[in-house]
Image (tube, helix red, strand yellow):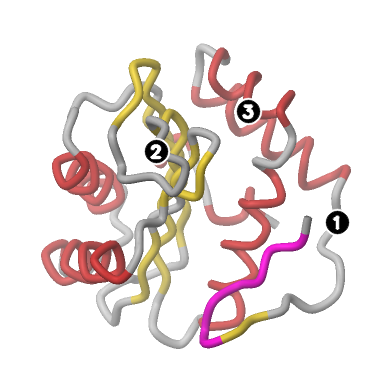
Amino acid sequence: MLLSFISEKLVLLEIKAKEKNAVIEELVNKIDSAGKLANRDNFLNAIIKREEIETTAIGKGIAIPHGRCEDVRDMSILFARSKEGIDFKSLDGKPVHILFMIAAPLDANKQYLQTIARIARFLRHEEIKEKIMNTPSASGILDIIKEFDNQCPIQGNIQTKDGRVIHGK
């Protein structure tokens, strides 16, 4: 369940940075300030390396930057948003407004992939995206995630190919 990996300390209601790498650094700093990283720079490098392989901006205003690193203490999810939008080199060319950054230890492969898939499923719902863009508080964001977790329990195994999650329609 998503709620077990996120807290109010891991909610950023408005991203200050305007450029992709600066945004990534701002989000990593937030995860670090929540005490989830043993070495901030190593995790930042893991996220940037992942972005160099392929953008994690999946379209429709959403990005899910993610990385696994030996310096992640606990699996964590950070939620962040930008009302203005960020050029994240999205697959559809549109600016990103909603970001979920996932920090995972190296040994959390299955849990890591399940979390990516679950966030993608969560964000398929337009009404959820609208709610999280307009909710004024971190506790409100967590309430929306809790409601999703309660209404949509985890189902079966996830499918992967070449270490990537295959998202259904």
The residue that disc 1 covers is 153
Query: Toward which corner of the image does residue 49 lie, by quadrant?
Result: bottom left
Residue designated by label 2: 93
Relative to 63, is 132 on the left or the right?
right
Residue on which the image places disc 3: 129
Determine the secondary structure under disc 2.
loop
Cα–Cα gap, marks 3 and 1: 19 Å
Q: In which quadrant will I find the C terminus?
A: bottom right
Q: Which residues are magenta?
A: 162-168
Left-right relation of 33 to 76: left
In the image, residue 165 lies in the stretch drawn in magenta: yes
Query: Viewer-nearest of labels 2 and 3?
Result: 2
> Is 123 rendered above or below residue 84?
below
- Given the image, on which type of amino acid does mark 2 rest? Gly
Mark with earlier residue (3, 1): 3
Q: Residue at x 30, y 77 (%)?
A: 69
